[in-house]
């Protein structure tokens, strides 16, 4: 039974990662062939970094991802603080509402945000572009930050904040010196997850972008509608490596926080 489970797991992993492995291999292919590997070259990576459209979209994507991640981390952390202070029933209701954008199909979120921006565009001279993209990314990033920060509040001693104030800390000092270090792993995880989702998002960005500001996934989609260039393979390889690196960092932070919590538990 165990052997059957291992075989099944290997088949699932192969199904998920073999296409990515093939994409990475053919990003170093000497020719444009997608079926025959004729020789090793870095020419497609060189062409990629000299493609002004891709570089412009990449810079735009990184700027939006960084700003959206920082803003959503701040808003999500503040929201988590407020939710944590609620009573049981209102807290459960608000958490369910907060989780709805995560469960909701991305196309519904994208279309609803597009309609909202169209409504404001007719009244406030709002143009689709960088601003609408940024607002959209912050909107779908905030729930992920809350989802990462809330468990840290649940693990924390609920009386630690009052204890810090009893020992002479002001409310701000108690939060910065006592509460924030306790929830910091969740805050960092929320930031990294927000950054990853912003970097990777296509559906919501597709409905909220404009001609003046496009993200990298939308540019890739536009390029794949014509004949696919191996530059796309090179670009996809770089994106995959970056996302894996972010996930490894996130996992390392979570494991370190868990180990720290276990040590504190043993000491207590």
Image (spheres, rainbow, N blue to C red):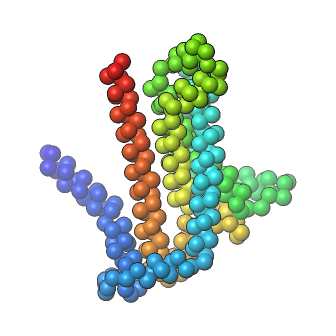
Residue at the spot 73% in from the left edge and 51% down from the top edge: 116
Residue at the spot 60% in from the left edge and 54% down from the top edge: 66
Residue at the spot 48% in from the left edge and 80% down from the top edge: 46
Can you say whether 122 is above or below 104 in the image? below
Which one is nearer the viewer's eye here, 63 or 6? Answer: 63
Q: Is residue 158 left or right of residue 263?
A: right
Q: Position of residue 181 (x, y in %)?
A: 51, 31
Q: How many numbered markers are drawn?
A: 0
The answer to whether residue 44 shows anywhere in this view is yes
The answer to whether residue 90 shows anywhere in this view is no
For the N terminus, the quadrant is: top left
Q: Position of residue 236 (x, y in %)?
A: 45, 69
Can you say whether 245 is above or below 167 in the image? below
Residue at the spot 43% in from the left edge and 63% down from the top edge: 240
Which one is nearer the viewer's eye here, 108 or 20? Answer: 20
Q: Residue furthest top?
A: 166
For the C terminus, the quadrant is: top left
Q: In which quarter of the image is residue 134?
A: bottom right
Q: Is residue 113 left or right of residue 144?
A: right
Q: Is residue 96 left or right of residue 240?
A: right
Q: Where is residue 80 in the image (x, y as percent from the top left)?
A: 58, 32
Q: Position of residue 241 (x, y in %)?
A: 41, 62
């Amino acid at each position: 039974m165990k052997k059957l489970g291992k075989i099944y797991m290997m088949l699932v992993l192969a199904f998920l990662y073999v296409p990515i492995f093939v994409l990475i291999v053919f990003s170093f292919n000497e020719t444009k062939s997608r079926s025959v590997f004729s020789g090793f070259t870095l020419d497609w990576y060189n062409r990629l970094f000299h493609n002004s459209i891709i570089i412009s979209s990449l810079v735009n994507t990184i700027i939006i991802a960084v700003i959206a991640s920082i803003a959503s981390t701040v808003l999500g952390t503040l929201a988590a603080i407020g939710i944590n202070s609620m009573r049981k029933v209102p807290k459960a209701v608000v958490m369910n509402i907060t989780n709805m954008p995560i469960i909701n199909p991305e196309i519904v979120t994208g279309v609803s945000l597009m309609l909202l921006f169209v409504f404001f565009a007719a009244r406030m001279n709002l143009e689709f572009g960088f601003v609408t993209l940024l607002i959209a990314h912050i909107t779908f990033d905030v729930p992920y930050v809350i989802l990462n920060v809330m468990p840290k509040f649940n693990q924390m001693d609920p009386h630690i904040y009052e204890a810090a104030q009893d020992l002479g800390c002001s409310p701000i000092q108690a939060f910065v010196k006592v509460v924030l270090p306790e929830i910091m792993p969740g805050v960092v995880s929320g930031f990294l997850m927000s950054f990853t989702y912003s970097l990777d998002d296509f559906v919501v960005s597709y409905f909220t972008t404009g001609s003046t500001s496009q993200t990298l996934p939308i540019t890739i989609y536009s390029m794949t509608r014509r004949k696919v260039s191996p530059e796309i393979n090179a670009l996809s390889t770089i994106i995959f490596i970056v996302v894996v690196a972010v996930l490894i960092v996130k996992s390392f932070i979570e494991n370190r926080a868990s180990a720290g919590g276990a040590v504190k538990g043993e000491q207590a």
